[in-house]
Image (spheres, helix red, strand yellow):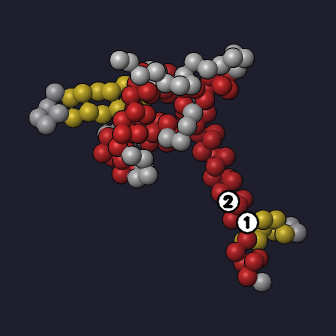
């Protein structure tokens, strides 16, 4: 019995944002894609990099990304067998979007640590201790 993903094809208004979120939405997929793009491409390495993800959830996310042709699973005929993941050309087409998300996140983190006081930045921590 094949398990269907709940939201994969939900897009009543034929919206590009909804389509994007159906493909790589959720808590983990962007992190997995970003890690694979930075050569963290083995299951155990991904688990170490994203410690809060359960083993089963990581398996599910990798399978869905493979099903959506975002990543390829490469099996090496060695003993013991080795499996690595790599981005497909379709997956690589997501990287400019993910890079912008990453840049926005870094800027927002910096802004959340500082606030504008007059013409200079003041750390929120030092401002609250005054």
Q: Nearer the viewer, residue 13 or 77?
A: 13
Quarter of the picture containing the N terminus is: top left
**Residue in the image at 61% along x and 33% along y:** 97
Percent x, y of residue 110:
67, 59
Q: CA distance from mark 2 to mark 1?
A: 6 Å
Q: Residues within 10 Å of mark 2 (few under 14, many from 20)?
A: few
Foreground of the two, 96 or 1 = 1
Q: Is residue 105 left or right of residue 60?
A: right
Residue in the foreground of this view, choosing between 12 and 123 = 12
Above or below, comparing residue 70 to residue 40 in the picture: above
Seen from this angle, which residue lies furthest right? 118
Q: Quadrant of residue 109?
A: bottom right
User: Percent position (x, y) of residue 72?
Assistant: 37, 25
Residue 31 in percent (x, y) is at: 49, 42
User: In this rendering, is residue 72 above or below 127?
Assistant: above
Asked where in the image residue 46 lies, by quadrant, the reply is top left
Note whether 96 is above or below 45 in the view shown: above
Q: Is residue 82 left or right of residue 35?
A: left
Residue 39: percent from the left, percent from the top? 38, 40
Q: Which residue is mark 1?
A: 114
The answer to whether one can see residue 89 in this image is no
Q: Are marks 2 and 1 in contact (CB under 8 Å)?
A: yes
Q: What residue does disc 2 label?
A: 110
* Residue under the point 49% across and 24% down: 5
């Amino acid at each position: 019995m094949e398990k269907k993903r709940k939201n994969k094809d939900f897009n009543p208004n034929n919206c590009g944002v909804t389509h994007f979120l159906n493909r790589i939405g959720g808590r983990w997929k962007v992190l997995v894609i970003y890690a694979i793009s930075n050569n963290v491409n083995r299951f155990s390495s991904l688990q170490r990099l994203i410690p809060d993800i359960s083993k089963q959830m990581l398996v599910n996310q990798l399978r869905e990304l493979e099903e959506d042709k975002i990543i390829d699973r490469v099996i090496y005929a060695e003993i013991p067998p080795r499996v690595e993941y790599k981005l497909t050309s379709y997956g690589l087409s997501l990287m400019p979007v993910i890079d912008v998300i990453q840049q926005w996140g870094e800027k927002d983190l910096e802004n959340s640590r500082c606030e504008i006081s007059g013409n200079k930045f003041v750390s929120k921590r030092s401002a609250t201790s005054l």
